[in-house]
Amino acid sequence: MAGAKEPKQYTGRRAYLNDFHLNDKGEYVFMGRMMSFDEEHMTYRQYIVRSVLSAVIMIAATALAECLPAVGLSRFGFTAIPWALQMVMTALTAYAVWKTAFGKNPMREYVYKSSAEKLPGRVILAAAFSLLTVIADTVYILIKGWEGEVLYTALRPALSLVCGVTAFLFSRMLKKTAWKA
């Protein structure tokens, strides 16, 4: 037929829609690549449990630092900016873990690209910003002192250190995992 339209080809952010095609019943069916978890030393379930546990520890340690009573350390931009960047990267890590956990195994390639593929970079950045926060907090303490609030002032860099160590261990686990098409 001369009047039949070709399906629209998407580019850019919506290119994954090209992998969906109409079947005979008029339903859209995914016809793209599927990525499956391919590891011998851990199961997919273990991978998800460890990932979720790591993300929860990272978020809790980062958020708890701001839930403490305000000390001079928390009101100083030199220490607040690295913490804010740590929080952003930790939240992005948790989001990627969430998408990976609900993406199933095997997962669609576009879900993999937006979650499991980006997870190692986000975890490394979260670890780097956590370390930067610890350094900034330590420098502040060395220059300004404890300002009478020893416990809360000491807990802030300690919680960032917990987040950083967890992120580092999480990144080591991610290096040992593989996905295949």
Image (cartoon, grey):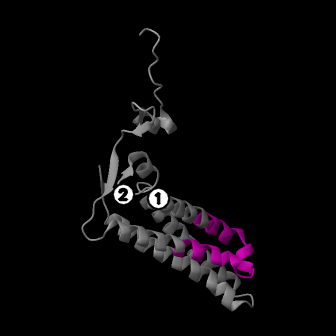
List the single residue furthest toward the top.
2
Q: Which residue occupies 44% across, 69% down? A: 51
Q: Is residue 89 magenta?
A: no
Q: Rate crowding at label 2 as few (under 14), some (14 to 19) or many (20 or more) other CA atoms within 10 Å.
A: some
Q: Which residue occupies 47% across, 64% down? A: 123
Q: Mark 2 belongs to which amino acid?
A: Asn
Label total for image:
2
> Horizontal and vertical percent for residue 28?
45, 36
Q: Mark 1 belongs to which amino acid?
A: Phe
Quarter-wise, where is residue 83 in the image? bottom right
> Element type at marker 2?
loop
Q: In whole angstroms, how far apart are the C-alphas of marks 1 and 2? A: 9 Å
Q: Which residues are magenta?
A: 57-86
Q: Which residue occupies 51% across, 62% down? A: 93
Q: Along the horizontal axis of the image, is 94 left or right of 75?
A: left
Most foreground residue, 45 or 42: 45
> Element type at marker 1?
loop
Q: Which residue occupies 70% across, 88% down? A: 146
Q: Quadrant of the N terminus?
A: top left
SS assignment for the magenta stretch, majority: helix
**Which residue in the structure is indicated by mark 1?**
102
Asked if 59 appears above or below 100 in the picture, the reply is below
Q: Rate crowding at label 1 as few (under 14), some (14 to 19) or many (20 or more) other CA atoms within 10 Å.
A: few
**Which residue in the structure is indicated by mark 2?**
105
> Horizontal and vertical percent for residue 114?
46, 50
Most foreground residue, 29 or 166: 29
Asked if 23 appears above or below 181 in the picture, the reply is above
